[in-house]
Image (cartoon, helix red, strand yellow):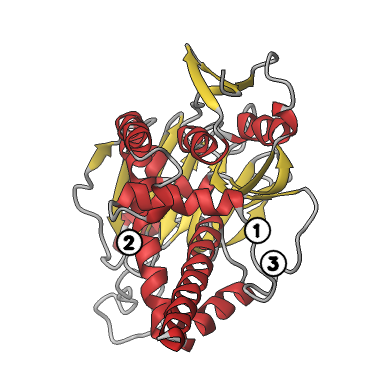
Amino acid sequence: MAGQTRQTMSNRADNKSVSDVAARWVARRDAGLTPFETEELQQWLDADERHRDAFDHYARAWSAFDRPARAGAQDAVMRELQARSKRRRARRVSAMSGAACAFAVVLVFALMRRQPDAGELSHAGAQQQSSVVVSRPESRVLEDGSTVELKPGAIIDVRYDETTRRVILERGEAHFQVAKGLPRPFVVEAGGMEVRAVGTAFAVQIDSAQMEVLVTEGRVAVEKTQSSAPAPLDTTGGDDDPGAELDDARIPPTFAAASPAVPIVPVAVLGVCERVVLDITMPTVTAPVVTPVSPAELNARLSWRISRLEFSSTPLAETVALINRSSHLPDGSAGARLVLDPASPGLAAEPVSGVFRADNIEAFVQVLGLSMGIEAERRGDEIILRKPR
């Protein structure tokens, strides 16, 4: 009997270890993995069926917790989580109720309160000193002052000349903030299409079949390049002499007026919070549909631009300052500002650990309450954090 008890306890401890590692892998994947970490995760998943089951379980929970923010229903979810935490006394939340939102709170709670064990992740190692890692998409400043943010996997080729500021998007997705006050048009070329803008901001995505344009500021014109060659000209003039000279009357009008530039055809004009999706496999574009995009949809569509913040025993004052600086959404709006109550001594030095999306302030505050007992009070656009009274 004693042997069976020890075996049962051992199995429980092993399952908890698997669960803890799976939770941290899910959070790190959301923040972005390096190629080496991606390979390491795959090896861990393939090593044991329980690993994959635990990972899938936490991935669903994390997704459920993050989705309300993208759908604009975060406040309602947070109120529900607060009610649940009161009913379950917060300390018992870690028992895992089975509800997806509660699972996600426990997931982040575990990340905040416990550092990775040695050997669980190769990059975890021993307990680390205070540190902060900010994960952002790659950003480039072009020679004219325009900026380009590249979603992982995107490739661009910059080709500026005296008449045009041209960027070729070879694959993936990029967001462009075009420098204002310059005479040369800014052109993004992708899949036989061109997006022209001056002093505006927009995103372009391309795959093997489609090209999408989404405007976040100003207006842009979408055009199609006519790269297909016209039918060969009849150089005989009806004569048997193949060397007869061409008569201008027989030259097609488009050829007579041709210039070294590639002919283009207007496709659509887009304003702020509008998008168009085009089929680039077809030789012509017919009646493209420009659709409006709500701020919530825009923020969700460009969520890859939002910073991920990883804290390791970081003082709360530092985490709050960084979140306040990094919490702007892709549409330019910002969430509530976090403020530490000066009447709560020692609060600023409280250590925080975990991985968070910079825009998910409400979730961050909820975790502080569950894991550290920190109270929050909303005052207009500010959230006041304090120790329990």
Residue 354 rendering spot, x and y as whole percentages: 60, 50
User: Which numbered circle lies on residue 115?
Assistant: 1
- For this rendering, which residue is in front, 135 or 169? 135
**Contact flag, marks 1 and 2 (Cβ < 8 Å):** no
Residue at far right of view: 129
Q: Say what amino acid the circle numbered 2 marks.
A: Gln
The C terminus - image quarter: top right
In the rendered view, tell whether residue 175 sits above or below residue 34: above
Q: Compute the Cα span from label 2 to label 3.
A: 40 Å
Residue drawn at (58%, 45%) of the image: 307
**Contact flag, marks 1 and 3 (Cβ < 8 Å):** yes
Q: Tell me: 318 left or right of 112.
A: right
Residue drawn at (39%, 30%) of the image: 272
Q: Nearer the viewer, mark 2 or mark 3?
A: 3
The N terminus - image quarter: bottom left
Residue underneath mark 3 = 124
User: Which numbered circle lies on residue 25?
Assistant: none
Q: Compute the Cα span from label 1 to label 3.
A: 8 Å
Residue underneath mark 2 = 210
Mark 3 neighbour class, 10 Å CA radius: few under 14, some 14 to 19, many 20 or more: few
Residue drawn at (38%, 59%) of the image: 255
Q: Nearer the viewer, mark 1 or mark 3?
A: 1
Q: Say what amino acid the circle numbered 3 marks.
A: Ala
Q: Tell me: 199 left or right of 86.
A: right
Q: Mark 2 or mark 1, which is nearer the start of the sequence?
A: 1
Q: Mark 3 or mark 2, which is nearer the start of the sequence?
A: 3
- For this rendering, which residue is in front, 239 or 112? 112
Could you tell me how many numbered marks the image carries?
A: 3
Q: Say what amino acid the circle numbered 1 marks.
A: Gln
Q: Tell me: 370 left or right of 98.
A: right
SS assignment at label 1 = loop
Q: Is residue 222 in sight in this rendering?
A: no
